[in-house]
Image (cartoon, grey):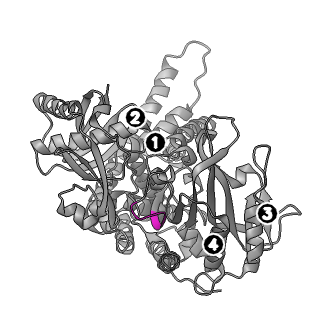
Amino acid sequence: MQKLITDRDLKNLWQKFFLEKGFKKIEGYSIVPENDPTVLFTTAGMQPIVPYLLGEKHPEGNKIFDVQRCLRTNDIDEVGDGTHFTCFEMLGCWTLGECNKEEMVKMSYEFLTSKKYLGIPKQKLAVSVFGGDETMPADTQTANAWKKCGIERVFFLPKENNWWALGGGVGPCGTDTEMFFDTGKAPCGENCSPACDCGKYIEIWNDVFMQYRVDNEGEKPKLLAKPNIDTGMGLERTVAVINGLKSAYEMGVLKQAIEFVKANSSSYVERSARIIVDHVRAATFILGDERGVVPSNIGQGYILRRLIRRAINHSRTIGFDSQKLISLAEMFVKEYGQDYSDIASNLNKVKEELEKEIQKFSKAIEDGHKEFEKALSGIERHKLFAKEGEKVENIISGKTAFRLYDTFGFPLELTKELAQERGYQVDEQGFNECFKEHQEKSRSLTAGTFKGGLADSGEQSAKYHTATHLLLAGLRSLEPDTMQKGSNITNERMRFDFNFSHKLTPEEIKYLEDFVNGAIQKNIKVVCEEMPLEQAKQQGALGAFSNKYSSIVKVYTIGNVSKEICGGPHAKNTGELGKFKIIKEESSSAGIRRIKAVLE
């Protein structure tokens, strides 16, 4: 079996294979999603492709592939073992508007087993397919296609294993087939299969066949007018498996980073080192991204802050100087900057924001010590004024311990240590209950069950999307160098970030409302054209992130008001939008303003 030395080898093979098969490469999208309010980060390779899976025409045609930066925090507690990461790269390919299962199975088999590519012996592979239920028969078509390729171990598994659907079960859906590498471990029992967690089988690829749709919850699936195939291969996990390694931390830049942490730790612990490396890599990806956010107490900035502070806490645990986290970030920028130019160009920003957060966290720890003393003083005062017969125990409540953890970054172990020195105990059960509640809220916020966390391409969001073009045109009439820096659209409102020299005055806000509403009242036709990127630039089309566009792009023209490179969706005429009203204007970050608006 061919050994792959680095993840770069796999990226190159992926590109070579799909180019030979007639697919076109598209650039990976930002890790901070645009116009998708259901998730804070891009959690899977398919997420930015959703409009095209729902029927929009892709400028590069119906066969495309890419490498996508992804971030998920729903499994953050598992980070530290050999297979879980918050940040990872996903290899993906898509066939839009058709679903030829046999062809996709043959391609999957060829890429996995051919000596030109991964060279995995077919005896080391096992696959799973949908086993059928009361709503849909078993996927024997895909099973037979695998058997024709020579794969003997084909497992028919239930819907929970081999059926893809949006959250709530409404929308596009279909069977999938998953490919597994046999590690050689003995079966855990007679019924051992890829559905087990025994470690015998490790998933390395997944083909989703979106052939159906569900219009209403509980209804039987119907055939989809334009079916698709979506595939995804986790880069780090696959490379580790192919190299016969137990963990992706044993190779490439991750190995280099682990060795650096080990060499600079006074009491090295592998799990802590892995958490440090993973979280700093994730922070580097977020900070270095073209739409990168900075640490804050809400939304994406909150997740970023938690990642950085968790890395600092584990650094303290193993005696690793937190200032050296910046050196780790430099390693990651050097490696991933080769593939993502925005990360390379934002090196200084990455370093500066990490330095700021390290300093802020040191201050938070100091404030946490003061808060700890306040908590003890409160208990002592309670003793002094307790009613006769009332017993006040030397116990710090779980709620207080969790507040120290969540607000000031105090690990539970630190609170327990300080409490013990003063003759106190900590209500660990209460802490765990608070922690569990926090986890559930975080998971719903950040992971959102991605299978339902897809950008809405409905009529109302199309109207809001069109309104952002008109708003940007209005802003540029005030300051010509204004550009979009981010947006978030739901069915109820739009949020638009942009660079601007100052806080908008009431007069400027009124001007913008009149500008947009004036364009709406003129009933201007929204025209979409496909053209080469260079032609679009020559025509003066605006592009917020032009280095990420394909060679062929969509240009939306709204009369003589606006001309932008954009992926859609849009209204057909400005007259469809209704009345535009700005409800809030505020600062988003240094030099960046934010407008929230509605269409009435």
In the image, residue 507 lies in the stretch drawn in magenta: no
**Circle 2 or circle 3, nearest the eye:** 2
User: Which residue: 62% across, 74% down?
Assistant: 107
How many labels sit on residues? 4
**Circle 3 or circle 1, nearest the eye:** 1
429 or 481, nearer to the observer: 481
Q: Residues within 10 Å of mark 4 (few under 14, many from 20)?
A: some
Give the residue number, with chain letter if any, for mark 2. 460
Give the mark nearest the N terminus, 4 or 3.
4
> Furthest-right residue in view?
190
Check residue 155 in the rendering and tell me which mark sits there, or answer none.
Answer: 3
**Circle 4 or circle 3, nearest the eye:** 4
Instruction: Work out whether 30 lies above or below 423.
Output: below
Q: Amino acid at mark 1?
A: Asp
Check residue 594 in the rendering and tell me which mark sits there, or answer none.
Answer: none
Q: Residues within 10 Å of mark 1 (few under 14, many from 20)?
A: many
**Magenta stretch bounds:** 59-68
How far apart in space, not on screen, are marks 4 and 3 (Cα)?
Answer: 17 Å
Residue 317 spot, x, y in % from top left: 49, 59
Give the residue number, with chain letter if any, for mark 1. 456
Check residue 108 in the rendering and tell me which mark sits there, or answer none.
Answer: 4
